[in-house]
Amino acid sequence: MEYSARIFNCLRCHSQAIICGCCDRGNIYCGSICSQESRKESHKASEKRYQNTYRGRLNHAKRQRSYRESKKIVTDHSSQKIPISDLLQPETKERVKTNCSGEIHCHFCGRICDSSLRVAFLVQSRVSTAGVWPLGP
């Protein structure tokens, strides 16, 4: 069974992603890596905005004062030395491997999707609150 799917560009890395109707919850990121990184950036920006307020500055000063009182020595730590033999870890993208048959798969769950892709979100239909549809003329 082929599922209806939506194609979109990730808001963070701008790569194309395909998501089936079962997984689609209004996603704007291609996977958990981009969504987590975007969340970190958003949280950091929020903290910075708070630090620039009067109340944020007072709370920061209070926190630093209590930290200094609890520690005898307040100095910066030197950088840790990185062993020369260490290699960088390769970056991984969460993608479902595609096969050569030309089938389109959901990037989130791997289901086979219909070849006609949507660009817009699915519109949810709502049932009348009274449970009865109004009669037409």
Image (tube, rainbow, N blue to C red):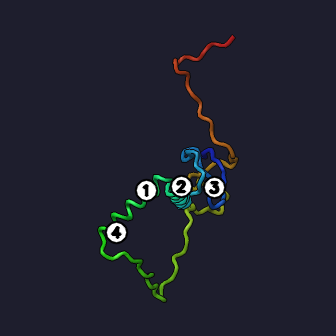
Q: Position of residue 124 (x, y in %)?
A: 59, 34
Residue that numbered label 1 is attached to: 58
Specify the label residue 68 is tagged with: 4
Report the residue at 43% width, 56% height from top. 58
- Asked if residue 39 shows in the view, the reply is no
Q: Nearer the viewer, mark 2 or mark 1?
A: 1
Sequence order check, earlier mark of 1 and 4: 1
CA separation in Å, label 3 and label 4: 42 Å
The quadrant of the rendering that contains the C terminus is top right
Q: Position of residue 62 (x, y in %)?
A: 38, 59
Disc 4 vs disc 2: Cβ atoms closer than 8 Å?
Answer: no
Q: Position of residue 63 (x, y in %)?
A: 37, 61
**Quadrant location of residue 121?**
top right
Q: Secondary structure at mark 2?
A: helix
Q: Nearer the viewer, mark 3 or mark 1?
A: 1
* Pick the front one: 18 or 63: 63
Residue that numbered label 3 is attached to: 11
* Pick the front one: 73 or 113: 73
